[in-house]
Amino acid sequence: MQQLLQNGRFAVSTWSLHRLLGAVHAYSPDPGKSAAPKEPYGPGAAALIDVPAALAARGIHRLEICSFHLPSLETGYLNELRDAMAASNVLFQTLLVEDGDPSHPETAERDVEWMARWIDIAAALGAERMRVIAGKQKPTEENLARAARHLNWLADKAEGSGVRVVVENWFDLLPSPVEMNWLLDRLDGKVGLNGDLGNWSAPAKYEGLADIMRRAEICHAKAEYGAAGLDGDDYRRCLEMCERAGYAGPFTLIYDSPFFPDEWDGILLQKQFIEGFLREAPARKTG
């Protein structure tokens, strides 16, 4: 727990800053896709290398980086980015590898070999973890078994690198705790879980989160927004499910809404909300 205490319980994913960062590079195992920069969210106003200092200035000392936000995979740039994190005392919690499908009947082997190449990049950046997509296919027995086989192989490839592979309750392969738990059981602790509060739909997601968050090491704490702003009832209930499951890890603040023009405003609002929830924890236990 020392690392958690040292770096706090909050992280930010660069996904929460996609308008600020601008250009994305769609690295992919598909040779038909180009990694040339595109600007689907506008030109941006900041460079990735400046994000650690911006985080530290706001009292946050954990970072997750989406693979498509890396403007270069050259060793020199990776070293500079790692140095920028160290200079701001920002822990690189997770490299989020944003493509590939280990459950695909035709391209799974190609995709997982591509994912394995990111292990060295994650290690060069000093990442604790690398989150990969478990699978995008329907949750048939065959597709789940294929994903489990390939993810086991990937975890073996990461052995000794200092980078732990994790998956997420995401995409069609993992629509409920049944499939999520089946997969984690087959991976036998070699692959961890990043529990995401926003990937499953209400109302079923609440009990689902209460089930899987007992196994989670990290958490994407995504909030829902409506016309009036943050949906506090939904966010609180998700956090209650984490509490019920005994989750005590960090919360990665995922802001994905046009509600605030400045993404930092949404990120810090979510941080404030969770801090309030955590402060009330002793009263809930005694109440």
Image (tube, helix red, strand yellow):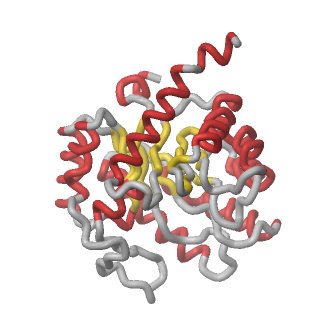
The answer to whether residue 161 shows anywhere in this view is no
Query: Which residue is more in the foreground, 268 or 29?
Result: 268
Position of 214 with respect to 49 (left or right) is: right
Can you say which quadrant of the picture contains the C terminus?
A: top right
- Picture coordinates of residue 69, whole percent (x, y): 33, 64
- Picture coordinates of residue 8, whole percent (x, y): 39, 29
Image height check: is 282 above or below 16? above
User: What residue is rendered at 17% in x and 53% in y?
Assistant: 80
Position of 102 with respect to 69 (left or right) is: right
**Which of the 4 image quadrants contains residue 148?**
bottom right
User: What residue is rendered at 66% in x and 32% in y?
Assistant: 240
User: What residue is rendered at 79% in x and 70% in y?
Assistant: 142
The answer to whether residue 123 shows anywhere in this view is yes
Query: Which residue is more in the foreground, 33 or 238?
Result: 238
Position of 260 with respect to 157 (left or right) is: left
User: What residue is rendered at 75% in x and 46% in y?
Assistant: 208
Q: How many marks?
A: 0
Furthest residue in direction top, as rendered: 286
Image height check: is 262 above or below 128? below
Furthest residue in direction bottom, as rendered: 32
Position of 173 with respect to 133 (left or right) is: right
- Picture coordinates of residue 263, whole percent (x, y): 35, 53
